[in-house]
Amino acid sequence: MKVEINGNTLELTVADITKQNTDAIVNAANGTLMGGGGVDGAIHQAAGSKLVQACKTIREQKLHGERLSTGEAVITNGFQLPAAYVIHTVGPVWNESNASTLDQRLMNCYINSLQLASNYDLSSISFPSISTGIYRYPLDRAAQIAIRSIGQYLQSHRFGEATMTLSSKDDYYVYKTELDKIINPT
Ligand code: ADP
């Protein structure tokens, strides 16, 4: 499914994000930037070991040894990936008692990634479903935030193509429901 928003496009697809040849793919990283499970592990494996070296340099030089904060984003080369760049962002770990703060941080993941891509003059980006795996965010809630955040950004910027690259048909339909809501608000 692909929709036009203010001259940009927002697409939903079921695919392996490590195979996407957009200018950038987004990694649902953890604050250490040293790789991990899920999509993070898959991206590091496909990109090769230069990716972890680039992340180490960012930790040392840009973050002064600190972890990357939840909702923030940094950029590296894509190395062996088809995508030229990887944007690493840290999604929130779901915790019901802190939901509205976490929602804001998840929104920041999408907005800051898009902003960083724009700063690098990139015009296509693929996102995974941030926080809905190991970080246990409720899928419908995360999908609504993702679609609204990307939609809002595209509405107010000339960007290009944003794609949600989902790992299953089930995820796809949850995201599609949220996208249908912003196209045909009732
Ligand atoms: P988080 O820690 O942010 O929850 P995960 O990597 O555990 O991140 O999961 C985020 C989403 O990425 C999940 O829906 C998972 O199924 C999906 N995913 C895992 N591998 C890939 C891949 N290669 N391409 C696209 N999506 C993937």
Image: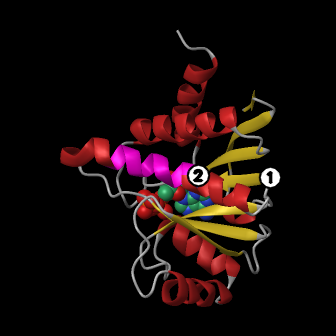
Describe the element under mark 1 as helix, strand or loop: loop
Query: Hey, which quadrant is residue 104 in on the image?
Result: top left
* Image side of residue 59 versus residue 5, left or right: left
| Between 34 and 7, the one nearer to me in the picture | 7
Q: Are marks 1 and 2 in contact (CB under 8 Å)?
A: no
Is 105 included in the stretch rendered in magenta? yes
Residue for badge 2: 167
Gap in angstroms between the C-alphas marked 1 and 2: 23 Å
Q: Which tag is nearer the camera, tag 1 or tag 2?
A: 1
> Which x, y percent locates residue 55?
57, 83
- Residue beneath the point at 53% across and 70% down: 40
> Which x, y percent locates residue 176?
59, 30
Residue for badge 1: 123
Mark 2, ligand 1, within 8 Å: the answer is yes
Q: Residues within 10 Å of mark 1 (few under 14, many from 20)?
A: some
The amino acid type, in three-letter code, at marker 1 is Ser
Q: Which mark is residue 155?
A: none
* Image side of residue 143 versus residue 1, left or right: left
